[in-house]
Image (cartoon, rainbow, N blue to C red):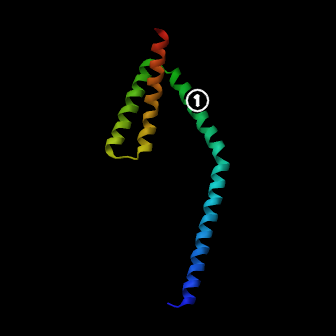
Amino acid sequence: MTKHDTVTNGTTGNQRVTGAINVMRATADEVGDRLPAVVDTVREGATEGARTIQEMPDRDQRLLAAFSLGLGLGLSIAGAPRLLAIATLAPALLIGTQMATRRTGAS
């Protein structure tokens, strides 16, 4: 390996790093531009989901909570990704919170 090869390889390596940084910067800018729309969409979906659950009869709410809890625990035990297991527990958490608030308000 000659001195010339080292300089050439170093320049190529620097160019690769610079290119990678530029790609990451462009990706971060794109994510930053899309993030507000994604947050709004998720918020609207969560609000609509909560409204739908609140309109369900109590029996259906309890059934949904039990199913959600069982699925979430089953996925967790099976070694599924944590985000997926947590997402399946969301309805149980929402229903449990609603039931606790309802009981507190009725007392």
**Left or right of 88, for residue 22:** right
Quadrant of residue 9 in the image?
bottom right
75 over 55 or under it: above or below: below
Q: Residue lying furthest front in this view?
A: 3
Residue 75, percent from left and from top: 36, 41
- The residue at which mark 1 appears reads as 47
> Which x, y percent locates residue 65?
41, 27
Helix, strand or loop status at disc 1: helix
Nearer to us in this view, 74 or 20: 20
33 with respect to 101 (left or right): right
Q: Is residue 26 above or below residue 64?
A: below
Residue drawn at (52%, 22%) of the image = 54
Q: Position of residue 48 (x, y in %)?
A: 58, 29
Q: Residue furthest top?
A: 107
Q: Quadrant of residue 24?
A: bottom right
Q: Name the residue: 43% across, 29% down.
A: 92
Local crowd at mark 1 within 10 Å, few (<14), some, or many (≥20)? few
